[in-house]
């Protein structure tokens, strides 16, 4: 990988991180829950053991926990 590609990737990551950090509390919690749910679904494709219900439950629990305990 060239230095320019790595620099471009890092700049985009930093912009995304800044955008996420500036989200309101509820929107941040929903984003974390959605990312959690999608992550579990992707892993379940490889493991073939986790169901959509488990992924949905993980997303809901993550959303509730981040909303309840986010210090912002």
Image (spheres, rainbow, N blue to C red):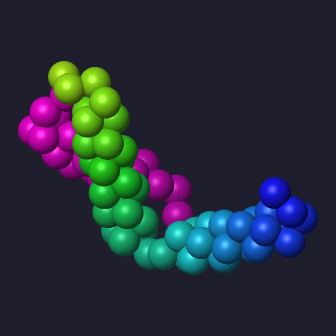
| Lateral position of residue 38 relative to residue 3, left or right | left
Question: Does residue 3 appear in the picture of this structure?
Answer: yes
Q: Residue 65 in the image: state x and y as whole percent.
A: 34, 45
Front one among 13 and 46: 46
* In magenta segment, residue 28: no
- Most prominent secondary structure in the magenta stretch? helix
Front one among 11 and 58: 11
| Lateral position of residue 8 relative to residue 31, left or right | right
Please tell me in which quadrant of the rendered image residue 35 appears. bottom left
Residue furthest left as drawn: 53
Question: Does residue 14 appear in the picture of this structure?
Answer: no
42 versus 7 height, above or below: above
Per the rendered image, the range of residues in magenta is 50-72
Front one among 14 and 47: 47
Please tell me in which quadrant of the rendered image residue 50 appears. top left
Q: How many marks?
A: 0
Image quadrant occupied by the N terminus: bottom right
Residue at position x 21%, y 40% from top? 55
Residue at position x 36%, y 71% from top? 27
Please tell me in which quadrant of the rendered image residue 26 appears. bottom left
45 versus 20 height, above or below: above
Residue at position x 86%, y 63% from top? 2
Front one among 50 and 60: 50
């Amino acid at each position: 990988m060239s230095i320019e590609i790595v620099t471009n990737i890092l700049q985009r990551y930093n912009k995304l991180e800044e955008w996420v950090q500036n989200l309101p509390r509820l929107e941040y919690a929903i984003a974390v829950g959605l990312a959690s749910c999608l992550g579990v679904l992707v892993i379940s494709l490889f493991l073939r053991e986790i169901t959509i219900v488990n992924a949905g439950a993980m997303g809901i629990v993550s959303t509730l926990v981040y909303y309840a305990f986010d210090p912002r």
